[in-house]
Amino acid sequence: MTQNDGDDYAFETRQIHAGELIDAEANARVTPIYQTAGYVFDSFDDGEARFAGRAGRAYSRNDNPTNAVASRRLANLEGGVDAVLVASGQAAIAAALFGLASAGDHILTTDSLYEGTREMFRGALKRQGLNFTAVAADADEETWLAKVTPRTKAIYTETIPNPLGDVVDLERLGRIAENAGVPLVVDNTVATPYLCRPFEWGAHIVIHSTSKWLAGHGAVIGGAIIDSGRFDWAANAERFPQLTTPPRPGVGSFVERFGQSAYLAYLRTVIVLEYGPTVPPSSTFLLLSGLETLSLRMERHVDNAQAVAESLVDHPAVSRVLYPGLPSDPHYELGRKYLPSGAGSIVSIDLRGGRDAARVFFDALTLVSRMTHIGDVRTLAIHTGSTIHAKLSEEERLSIGIVPGLIRLSIGLEKADDIVRDLRQALDKAALVEGD
Ligand SMILES: Cc1ncc(COP(=O)(O)O)c(C=O)c1O
């Protein structure tokens, strides 16, 4: 089954077969790890043709058969035309934006995002000359469009923002992006294509940290960028000259040469080739093994998360459970629209006793791992204010909803009763701590 001819198969079948490669040497059923830096050129002319992209592969920095299988599979599962794999989710975000914007350019973002992303936007990418403006996801269209300048190159968001779970209205943002003449870039890490496929709602580019649910076992770091092929670069030619003007005399523009895949071709042959954020094929082998069971794991992840969220709402130590699968959650309706098969498996809780209660709760966990990471088979907990958000002032943390007692849980695949038992015994201890 190739990337595109499997579209009449169900997700569960495509996660195992789409884009597969039967190795020519041994007919190995499982995609081999092509652990090689380069590929032999048959001749002088073959070397020239490989470098020009007319034949075979030239070098593993941006082109490896194991990585190509996972790229095709992810593109298939998201409903895109093409994908490129990189070394981490952070690398995917940076590469995606380097493919769209250069120094002096501007990106609009929603205001609730993974803090590592926010940190990169206000740190490393800002130092490279990119400017970011955060807008409330539910701000009206006029507010969004008023922030668009001729140098705005994208709108950036997350399907289920980490850690608050404040699901965004993708369809509305997709419309706003179209009206602004820029692509909507969506980090779909927390939803995965099993729960939500942002291209069906108007997104143009999807990025993933494949380190999380896609690989699933907490054993690898990786990232991916997937292109829907739907953004009309030619209609917005002045904004995206890297795609719409010839790179040198006598060579067609990326749009002329690659059509719908122009952006991904640019990422692969310019951004990834030049910056080199290569993911090792050995990591991709583990990603492929994980992907084969994605649907099964996600069903269990969301069932467990729902059970945990419901079981914690009434605990006296907990003032609030943030989970868009709870009818009481302000993002429940958006969750129902965009996540009909389950609201993901990040459950955040706010402890009444603030930071002191969070410390007692955290130290009392026995089954649940104290760890930064999400989307593992194991249930993980972290106090984000003292770790992921520690570089922010208390005031900054409060302004983005990171209250002192906030604990992020990534609900794993253990038996739900066991997860709940561990969380509740730790909460019982935290309940003894006086509130701030
Ligand atoms: C939503 C989201 N996007 C991107 C990343 C970055 O991914 P990675 O750790 O693979 O670099 C993370 C990491 O936690 C994340 O939660």
Image (spheres, grey):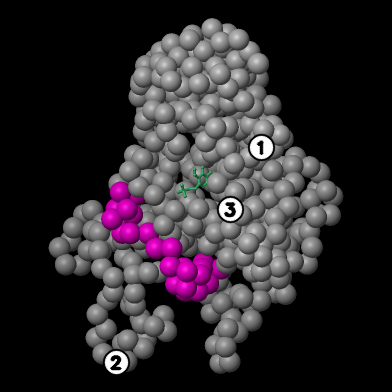
Say which amino acid is labelled 1.
Answer: Ser
Q: CA distance from mark 1 to mark 3?
A: 17 Å
Specify start and end residues of the magenta stretch as a single range.
263-288
Badge 3: how crowded within 10 Å, few (<14), some, or many (20+)? some
Residue, disc 2: 44
The image shows residue 241 at horizontal and vertical percentages of: 66, 76
Residue, disc 3: 120
| Magenta segment main secondary structure | helix
Identify whether 238 is placed above or below 229: below
- Looking at the rendered structure, which numbered label has been put on residue 70? none
Say which amino acid is labelled 3.
Answer: Met
**Mark 1 secondary-structure assignment:** loop
Residue for point 23% across, 53% down: 30
Q: Is residue 10 visible?
A: no
Quarter of the image for residue 52 reads bottom left
Identify whether 154 is placed above or below 188: below
The image shows residue 205 at horizontal and vertical percentages of: 58, 57
Q: Nearer the viewer, residue 398 or 139?
A: 398
- Looking at the rendered structure, which numbered label has been put on residue 393? 1
Residue for point 21% across, 54% down: 29
Q: Is residue 358 visible?
A: yes
Badge 2: how crowded within 10 Å, few (<14), some, or many (20+)? few
